[in-house]
Amino acid sequence: MEMKTPTPMKPIRSFLFVPGNKPTWIEKVIDSKADALILDLEDSVPMDAKKEAREIVKSKLAWLAEQKQRTFVRINRSPHLYDFDDILAVVGPHVEGIVISKPCGPEDVDCVSMMLSEAEYRNGAEIGTTRVVPLLETARALHFAYEIALRERVSALVGATAKNADVARALGYVWSPEGRESLYFKSRAVMAARAAGKLPIGGVWQQVRDLDGLRASALKDRALGMTGELLLHPSNVATANEVYSPSADEVAFYEGMIAALDKAQAEGRASTIYDGEHIDIAHAKTAREIIELARAYNK
């Protein structure tokens, strides 16, 4: 069987977790306008509710697709392997991809990819269409971030931090709101993802009622090169969407930049001064990408 190579993934500004054992939450959360949902079968679901959550998630996938909601599922893992029953239950036309926690390295992604191919075959889905989004939560995964990003099914890398969570334990850092302790490995995740042509995703802001703190944290992630955030509460979606969307002022600035360079080129020059800055063709390329991104989000 020939495996299809996934197309580049559309940007995700807001990547919102929803517990898989809460059917009413799944129904209500689409009003948050998150770019994508992660229906969670792992940490947010009690051990005795795992099977029930799997059936609830399975039952909601077609409905979410009807609402034009992009949907991913975070599957469970044992100490040695990811849960094939979870994969088999959700793989199909209504799930864009799966999220995997705590991969030890690229070999874990290879294992999941083989399991996905088997599930796609059994469920009548095209082989290779289900994306994988790894959460880089182990020291070894962060070390091999680029090798993980190169895997065909991987469409985004998550280089997220959270107070007292898996990454903090794995690396032994002490969390701070300023985030100085995580700058290196977040940048490492961004560089690996960008080098492989994949999306880098940041987060996680656990103090969900502190929207000012969320905004400050998301702005720092965006400044590092992240394209979106993992989120834990629907109230956080609007902030993330705003931070990761080019503002009207930004769009106007870059439209003016393009016009200035077009004028310079018409006069036989490849560079000019715009708003006090020296610009050339490379700057115009960046400007066009930002304007195109703004148009995509406004559709």
Image (tube, rainbow, N blue to C red):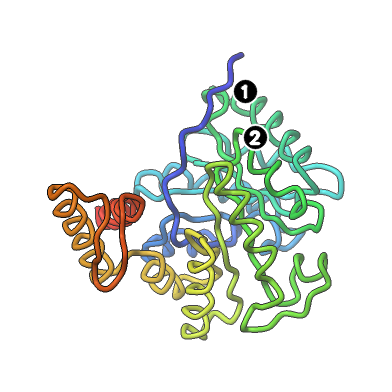
State the CA–CA distance, disc 1 to disc 2. 8 Å
Pick whichever, 54 or 32, lies toward us.
Answer: 32
Marker disc for residue 244: none
Q: Amino acid at mark 2?
A: Leu
Residue 92 in percent (x, y) is at 52, 33
- Which residue position is annotated with label 2? 88
Q: Amino acid at mark 1?
A: Arg
The residue positioned 53% from the left and 23% from the top of the image is 4
Residue 181 in percent (x, y) is at 71, 76
Pick whichever, 16 or 85, lies toward us.
Answer: 16
**Left or right of 129, for residue 248:** left
**Left or right of 119, for residue 260:** left
Marker disc for residue 122: 1
The residue positioned 81% from the left and 58% from the top of the image is 139
- Bin the neighbour count of mark 1 within 10 Å (Cα to Cα): few under 14, some 14-19, many 20 and up: few
Residue 115 in percent (x, y) is at 70, 31
Q: Report the quarter where the N terminus lies.
A: top right
**Left or right of 158, for residue 165:** right
Q: Residue furthest right?
A: 79
The residue positioned 43% from the left and 51% from the top of the image is 11
- Bin the neighbour count of mark 2 within 10 Å (Cα to Cα): few under 14, some 14-19, many 20 and up: some
Residue 10 in percent (x, y) is at 42, 46
Q: Is residue 297 visible?
A: no
Element under disc 2: helix
